[in-house]
Image: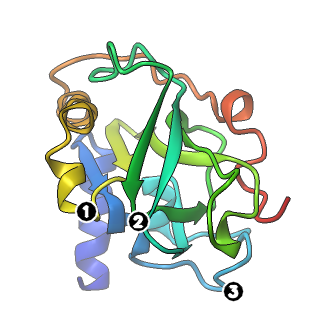
Amino acid sequence: MSPAGKQRLLGAIAAGKGFVGFHSATDSFHSAGARNAIQTEVDPYIAMLGGEFISHGPQQEATVTVTSRKFPGLEGAGSSMRLMEEWYALKNFPKDLHVILVQETDGMTGPQYARPPFPATWARMHGKGRVYYTSFGHRDDIWTNPTVQKVMLGGFAWAMGNVDADVTPNISEVAPKGNQLTK
């Protein structure tokens, strides 16, 4: 994407268009600086999206905790989900995230998970635009999982403006050490 195209995309979202990102959407337009560090200045795309990819370990079974049970698609999801996936380690979360699912890191294999729990799915406003992201999406069986499908469809419905949801920032309550890259 050209720099002008990127600016048009970000401008359209800020003006009220919705944006939905899955899995590798956080692995685009990386911020300048070390991958294993928190940046003080993040790329404008990352600022819009709300998080940035660091790396991933081996595909493994892990738990995400539901932190926003009233968000569309989470009705009846329970308090957590345990799934096999390629789990992204993420960083550069802004203070205005409404975290929907938290990545639990205890027991995960890989040095990138030797850190406190962090956001895995979230919603936020970018200007007038609704932004939804989930780290789900690497494995085929994730896309066919009925519970995950409900989570994804809820995110689409909210981002398109078809349903409303309370997206009051909650990161400081549900993932207070989300930007801490070590324990």
Q: Position of residue 113 (x, y in %)?
A: 67, 63
Between 55 and 142, the one lying in front of the other is 142
| Type of amino acid at the residue the image marks with label 1 | Arg
Residue 69 visible in the snapshot: yes
> Image point 59% across, 38% down: which residue?
96
| Type of amino acid at the residue the image marks with label 3 | Ala
> Image point 64% across, 82% down: which residue?
35
Mark 2 neighbour density, 10 Å: few (under 14) some (14–19) many (20 or more): some
Q: Position of residue 27 (x, y in %)?
A: 41, 74
Q: Of tags 2 and 3, which is closer to the observer?
A: 2
First in residue order: circle 2 vs circle 1? 2
Q: Which residue is mark 3?
A: 34
Quadrant that contains the C terminus: bottom right
Mark 3 neighbour density, 10 Å: few (under 14) some (14–19) many (20 or more): few
> Image point 73% across, 69% down: which residue?
38
Distance of label 2 from label 1 (alpha carbons)? 7 Å
Distance of label 3 from label 1 (alpha carbons)? 28 Å
| Type of amino acid at the residue the image marks with label 2 | Glu
The quarter of the picture where residue 161 lies is top left
Q: Position of residue 54 (x, y in %)?
A: 57, 74
Q: Which residue is mark 1?
A: 139
Q: Of tags 3 and 1, which is closer to the observer?
A: 1
Are dots 2 and 1 in contact, CB under 8 Å?
yes
First in residue order: circle 2 vs circle 3? 3
Are dots 2 and 3 in contact, CB under 8 Å?
no
Q: Secondary structure at mark 3?
A: loop
Between 83 and 103, the one lying in front of the other is 83
- Above or below, 169 against 116 in this view is above
